[in-house]
Image: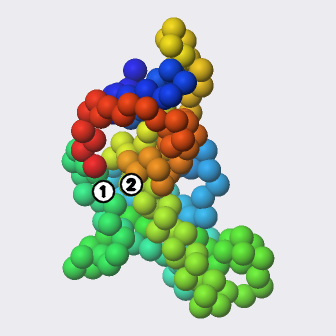
Amino acid sequence: MDDLIEKIELDDGTIVKIFRDSTAQTPPEYTDMLGDVYIGGQIYDGMKDALDMDVDLLAAIASGKALVIPFMYLGGRQECLLWQDAVNNKTDGIIVSTNEKLCHEYGVDELNKETLEVARRVLIGELEMFNQWMSGDIFGYVRLYKNGKIKDSCWGYYGTNFTENGLYDASGVTKHAKNHINVKKCPF
């Protein structure tokens, strides 16, 4: 089983165990993303090789008919995607969505400044989600009866703020925690 992060006893006697979700699917496998991620070099599930970019997409990018956000990839144990500004104009990949796709997604005939800003924030959020997936920042819980049998479980919570991401609410910890034990200090 995945790394145990926390163990919490609830007032009804059940135990909630929170684990790192090492088998989480890549974001494109379970969600409809606004952008497509293209990267040169190491390809991860859900990412596409920049060399395989469709000719129509290349034309849209070249003619300014696509929203493109470059990012840098930093390899290693805590893999990271940075998108703020390509440092020294260096980029390892892009997340891109054509204007046509954006117009369809937002139900407009023409993109304005506000719609493009919303789309830009969505694409950055998608990169953040990829970053969390790549660095193993995804968790789940198992809630056990006193006899050790599973009462319920749920996986795919992004981030270590279990209050903010809803894991504590879903598992019953928010309302019913009796004894909270940090089993492992999370490295994030």
Distance from Cα at disc 1 to Cα at disc 2: 6 Å
Q: Nearer the viewer, residue 32 or 55?
A: 32
Q: Is residue 169 visible?
A: yes
Direction top: furthest residue: 147
Depth order, front residue of 56/9? 9
Q: Residue at x 27, y 73 (%)?
A: 90
Q: Residues within 10 Å of mark 1 (few under 14, many from 20)?
A: many
Most distant residue in the bottom direction: 113
Give the SS element for disc 2. helix
Q: In the drawing, what numbered circle is on residue 52?
A: none
| Amino acid type assigned to the residue bearing label 1 in the image | Cys
Q: Is residue 143 above or below residue 149?
A: below
**Image coords of residue 84 (percent x, y):** 34, 75
Quadrant containing the N terminus is: top left
Q: Name the residue beneath numbered marker 2.
A: 131
Q: Do the numbered discs 1 and 2 sit on residues whose CB atoms are within 8 Å?
A: yes
- x and y percentages locating residue 166 in the rendered image: 53, 48
Residue 149 is situated, as x and y percent measured from the top left of the image, at 54, 12
Residue 49, above or below 16: below
In this view, 48 is above or below 107: above
Question: Relative to residue 187, is residue 138 drawn left or right?
Answer: right
Residue 173, image x, y percentages:
49, 38
In what element is the residue under mark 1?
A: strand
Quickly name the residue at label 1.
Answer: 80
Q: Residue at x 38, y 64 (%)?
A: 93
At horizontal 25% and vertical 57% (from top left) the residue drawn is 74
Instruction: Name the kind of residue labelled 2 in the image.
Output: Asn
Residue 4 location, quadrant: top left
